[in-house]
């Protein structure tokens, strides 16, 4: 297994003792991301649409650092602080993903730091080269 963090990038640093991504075989597991600013590390201002878009931007940046894209995502979990935001979240989410869509679960949970949404994904890299580009912070 390979563990990745991305210090000194536009990807917000982890809040705690975890990796941004773990590669296990042909699968890449990303830690859940909330809508944080890359510079301050704080939650961005904005509604569910803005926060969903920012979460997906961070996820896209992590995947890109590993030579992947949102098209490689096979599973997502979208955590909502209020299930009433589902339709608005879904609009932003559907703008980022194209068919065939990954499988998805969307539970309502209490989110940290007042976040409205958090997203975690699993990607499949089997259709790509078995050798990943090693970014700074890989181990």
Image (cartoon, rainbow, N blue to C red):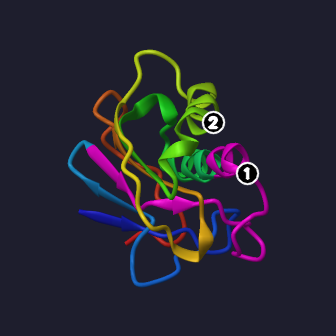
Residue 53: image x %, image y %? Answer: 67, 44
Magenta segment, which residues? Answer: 27-54
Q: Is residue 3 left or right of residue 81?
A: left
| Residue 88, numbered label | 2
Q: Are marks 2 and 1 in contact (CB under 8 Å)?
A: yes
Residue 75: image x %, image y %? Answer: 33, 38
Q: Residue 124 occupies which quadrant of the picture?
A: top left
Residue 104: image x %, image y %? Answer: 35, 36
| Residue 22, numbered label | none
Label 2 vs 1, first from the N-terminus: 1
Question: Which residue occupies the foreground of this view, 83 or 45?
Answer: 83
Residue 26: image x %, image y %? Answer: 24, 42
Determine the residue positioned at 60% across, 30% down. 96
Determine the residue positioned at 60% across, 65% down. 115
| Circle 1 residue | 47
Is residue 60 placed above or below 42 in the rendered structure?
Answer: above
């Amino acid at each position: 297994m390979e563990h990745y963090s991305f210090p000194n990038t536009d990807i917000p640093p982890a809040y705690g003792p975890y990796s941004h991504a773990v590669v296990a075989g042909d699968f890449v597991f990303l830690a859940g991301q909330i809508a944080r600013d890359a510079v301050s590390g704080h939650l961005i201002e904005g509604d569910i649409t803005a926060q969903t878009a920012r979460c997906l931007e961070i996820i896209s940046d992590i995947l890109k650092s590993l030579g992947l894209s949102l098209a490689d995502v096979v599973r997502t979990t979208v955590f909502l602080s209020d299930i009433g935001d589902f339709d608005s979240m879904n609009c932003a989410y559907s703008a980022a993903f194209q068919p065939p869509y990954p499988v998805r679960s969307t539970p309502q949970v209490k989110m940290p730091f007042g976040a409205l949404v958090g997203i975690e994904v699993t990607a499949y890299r089997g259709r790509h080269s078995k050798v990943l580009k090693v970014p700074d912070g890989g181990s």
